[in-house]
Amino acid sequence: MYSDILTCFSRSQHRASFEVFLDLLLDGSGRPLPERATVKSPAAISRFLNHAAWNTRQFCRVMRQHALQLLQHEWRLRPHQRPRLDLLVDLTSLEKSGKFADLDDWMHTFNSVHGVHLVVLYLCCGQLRLPWAVQVWRGKGTPSPAQLALKLLRTVPPALLSGKRRPRLHADGGFESIEFIQGVLAHGLDIVVGVRCTRKLEDGRQVRDLMVRGDLVKPTGLDQIMCVSWVWLHRNQEPEQRFVMSNLNLGGVYLARVGKGRWRIEAFFKTIKGRFGLERFAQHSKQGVFRWWCLSTLAFFLCHFQDLDSPVRTPQVWPDWGDLARTLRFSFVPEVRRQALLLELAALDAFQHAQNCVKT
């Protein structure tokens, strides 16, 4: 994948800027800021992100093609016990302050957070974790996050949605609308979605009035029998009850366990923000923000593929992304590291020489 990514840069200066920025991403500290670059000037990195004429669509296409090939390879390896494909959608907010004139229709306040809000589609299959597509929520009066999520589903190839084991879509309570649930079912997918405790049922009760986990009920306005369960979260002094419902009759205990699978996308958000600096962008152009997302996602992909190739790994355990990033940093951009160290040594020699001159 890395070799194919390099073909997206027809000019050597774009490729050099890409390698410098990838070096910043693979630092693993979550601070890939252009001003931290030494081999290239911060202005050159900013031009690369905001103005340089390299093919962003081809860049995304290469990542998606390799993700698709890896997923299909996973299925070919286990034809008799094909892992289920889980599709996870969620909204994540990149909090920002200050003025971004060119991002006016992207900067909004949602759930008390001001910034850019992304609706993300994330694919999980066995050990694979593949960020697939993204849409920007543009505020009230525009398509809602649920409508954007349905749009993202149309980007999934039909070949991934076919097979004996029907894929499941996981979402939180922000996607519990009738339109969204019906749209997911129309795609031939099963759904496991969070639900508000005040959601009304056709018999006049609310979801919080249910006494038995696994009850089969019909929500108001939805022509579909749904199975409802719940879990108790003990994060604060008072336990918090969270409800989940599905078109599948999985039973109360198992549905509650399946519903927890949605948290896998939260782990991805935490990693791509904390390790690969997704929310640290300071770009004032939409192209720059979108390219920042693409490059952060590439860093995640490379580290995830490296982890899958590791001969010693513990299944179902989130890896040390810092160690993975540093390993890839030395593998893919060693020349950038070498040039940066030579510049630092030259600065150190000049400093010591100046000190010696002062002493003499």
Image (spheres, rainbow, N blue to C red):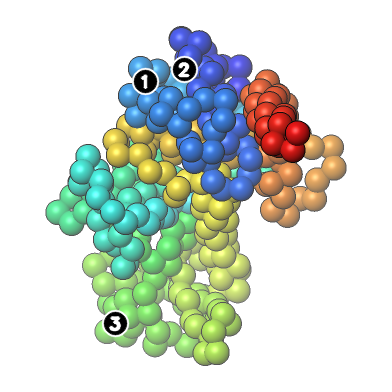
Mark 1 or 3, closer to the camera: 1
| Rendered residue at 50%/10% (across/down) | 12
| Rendered residue at 24%/50% (across/down) | 99
On the image, which quarter does residue 218 sit in? bottom left
| Rendered residue at 52%/25% (across/down) | 40
Of 155 and 59, nearer the camera is 59
Left or right position of 96 against 299? left
Q: Position of residue 137 (x, y in %)?
A: 28, 49
Q: Position of residue 106 (x, y in %)?
A: 25, 47
Disc 1 versus disc 3: distance between alpha carbons?
Answer: 59 Å
Left or right position of 21 against 77? left
Considering only order in the chain, which callout, 2 or 3, is on the residue closer to the N terminus?
2
- Whether residue 6 is situated above or below residue 243 in the rendered picture: above
Residue at the disc numbered 3: 203
Q: Amino acid at mark 1?
A: Ala
Image quarter hosting the C terminus: top right
Disc 1 versus disc 2: distance between alpha carbons?
Answer: 7 Å
Q: Residues within 10 Å of mark 3 (few under 14, many from 20)?
A: few
Q: Residues within 10 Å of mark 2 (few under 14, many from 20)?
A: many
- Whether residue 85 is situated above or below residue 330 in the rendered picture: below
Kindly identify which numbered label has been placed on residue 239: none
Residue at the disc numbered 1: 52
Can the viewer see residue 284 in this picture?
A: yes
